[in-house]
Amino acid sequence: MVTVFLKNDNLKVKAPLGTSLRQIALKSGAAMEFGCRVGDCGTCIAHVTSGMEILNTKSDKELHVLEMLGGNVAQLRLMCQCEVRCEEGEIEISYGL
Ligand code: FES
């Protein structure tokens, strides 16, 4: 299981391979906000402070939206587009940038 630390809410959640970050946010009650849920609006932008390698890679569409929103794109993700892609590890996320 992967441990996901949702910094803003001080929550640690265990997540199996294949779990989406949106599922994790909804199940844990985290205050992460979502809009379109398909990677268009950028509402769910978050800063992955560690464990980026545990998540799926960014699609061209996600990368384009992140570039439009600005900041350090290497550490940013859209939570509605993220999925756990490893069996073990730790991910730390802050949101509402
Ligand atoms: S909710 Fe719109 S991009 Fe994630």
Image (tube, rainbow, N blue to C red):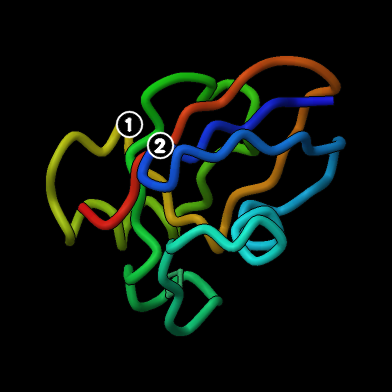
Q: Nearer the viewer, residue 18 or 14?
A: 14
Identify the secondary structure beneath mark 1.
Answer: helix
Q: Which residue is mark 1?
A: 75
Q: Tell which residue pokes out farthest to the front in this image.
A: 10
Which quadrant would residue 64 be assigned to in this image?
bottom left
In percent of width and height, residue 51 lies at 53, 21
Residue at 47% over, 70% down: 39
In percent of width and height, residue 5 lies at 54, 32
Query: Which numbered tag is attached to residue 7?
Result: 2
Badge 1: how crowded within 10 Å, few (<14), some, or many (20+)? some
Q: What's the residue type where badge 1 is placed?
A: Gln
Q: Tell whether label 2 touches label 1 (CB within 8 Å).
A: no
Instruction: Give the label, 1 or 2, closer to the camera.
Output: 2
Residue at 85% over, 22% down: 87
Q: Nearer the viewer, residue 63 or 72?
A: 72
How far apart marks 1 and 2 lie (CA) works out to: 15 Å
Picture layout, residue 80 above or below residue 55: below
**Can you tell me which quadrant of the image ligand 1 is in?**
bottom left
Residue at 57% over, 58% down: 81
Identify the secondary structure beneath mark 2.
Answer: helix
